Image (spheres, grey):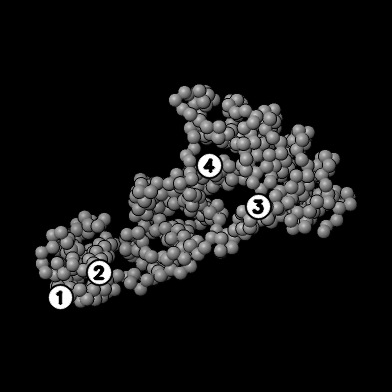
Amino acid sequence: MAYWLTCLLLCLSCGQAWAKSIQCSQAKKSIELLICADERARELDKQLDDTLGDLLVDASTVQRRKLNLDQQQWIEKERDLCSDAKCLSRAYEARLKQINPLSDNEISCDKMEKYPHLVFGHGGPDLGSGSYSPTGADYSCPQSLSSQKFLQPLLNMAELIHGDSGPQQCGGTIVHALWRYYQFGLAKAGVAPVLFAKDEKAAAADSPRPTLDYFEQWGESSRHNYRIVQKYMREQRQARPQLLAFYRRQRHLSVSEANAAADQVEHYILDRAAGSFPLHEFQASSPLVLTVRDEHASIMQLRSLLQDKTRSFTDMDVYRAIEASLLHRRPTSWVQVLLDHLSESDWITLGKEREPLLAFAVPNQQYVELLLSRGVPVDAQNGFGKTALFYAIEENQLDIVRTLLVRGANVNHAYLSADELRRSDDYVDVCIFPNLTHTRRTPLMHAAQHADTAMLQVLLAAGARTEDLDDQGDNALNYAINNRQEHNQLLLKATGLRIR
């Protein structure tokens, strides 16, 4: 077992011999052969061995001496007197119940502190796979990371990104079990950070997941996601010094131990936020995108990559690099270099059901004009039916809105309806976007909510219809009222519009 060497040294320091679990390949005594011949007895022997090992690691010198002495007496006076498998099972089960503080299937904060290796070792307890957990645990212990005030912004963002909202039939009861295991891990990271770091590092080595790359890709898939990722990473950077201080002062770790634990905590919380992606569908970011992400990279490096005959980049690799360049606000020259590797016919095929490329350009007027000059379609829409015009409106970018309208943007384009978005084959699936509201909104409605009267006047002059309704039956005036846009209300009422 993992703690054998430690346990052996601890026991020898107590002046007692440690009786290891039965090694069946070396079994000679009749009792050893009896144990090895029965599967249940072998299982119980291993379980008792693990439990004792964990108790010895967590115990004081006096407690270790007593544990070892009691174990020797139990072997001599109970276990070795058995002559059949049933007797062995009863003896082992009674011994486990006697020495294991977790035998009542309840894990308190006190037990976590007193017996960290027993509580958190060997994969941890069985916390169930649905609504019910066979083991009760206190998930709000003072030393758990979930209770640390400085971590709350990061933890809250992780939950927001993770997103277990919507009807239960859409997520199933497993979401409850996943929450319990996650919270238990936060408790482990707070109470036993060295053990946490070791176990998490081993788990990552056994089953590596490129969660950070996926998270960055997710962030580069839309302006909304990009803002979330940037905020998340800021919260992570701000929390780290306080996490290190917590480990140094509260858990008395060395600098290297504190950093190792903090590294694994960052991976652990990020995995909660974004780790549920299907690994078999994931494709690592291309060197082009990695270069764009690197704030120290130069345009010469970008050109060198594109000209490298030993590399083969797909059109989608280039397209994603363009998206990333716009989001990361790389110089216009970078975008031009990448645009040169695609043709006008690529915009529709590569951009299908993705965010409009022009949406990534907002609020940069130069980006917008460059993309339009290369034939990027002005009314390309994302999966919700949202065009670049909506993005420019919500940021109140009047000049960009005028540019888009002059280039033919549809001033009355509407989002897709809820039924259109949720339709799967021949039926409507409520589990697709379960929290949708106010679909079929138009640019005028969007402006009534997000922009000012100047924006409304530009849209009205371009032919925006005031009578259009969204899926909730609301018109642009409803949007202005619901969002307390008083000046927008007055202007819309002046057109004769009334609430429905």
**Pointer 3: what residue?**
421
Q: Which mark is residue 83?
A: 1
Q: Secondary structure at mark 1?
A: loop
Tag 2–tag 3 contact (CB < 8 Å): no
Q: Which mark is residue 40?
A: 2
Tag 3–tag 1 contact (CB < 8 Å): no
Q: Amino acid type of disc 3?
A: Leu
Q: Amino acid type of disc 4?
A: Gln
Closer to the chain start, of discs 4 and 3, is: 4
Q: Amino acid type of disc 1?
A: Ser
Give the number of callouts. Answer: 4
Q: What is the CA distance from the residue labelled 3 to the residue labelled 1?
A: 69 Å
> Is residue 446 visible to us here?
no
**Pointer 4: what residue?**
217
Q: What is the CA distance from the residue labelled 2 to the residue labelled 3?
A: 54 Å
Q: What is the CA distance from the residue labelled 4 to the residue labelled 3?
A: 23 Å
Could you tell me which quadrant the C terminus lies in? Answer: bottom right
Mark toward the viewer: 2 or 3: 3
Mark toward the viewer: 4 or 2: 2
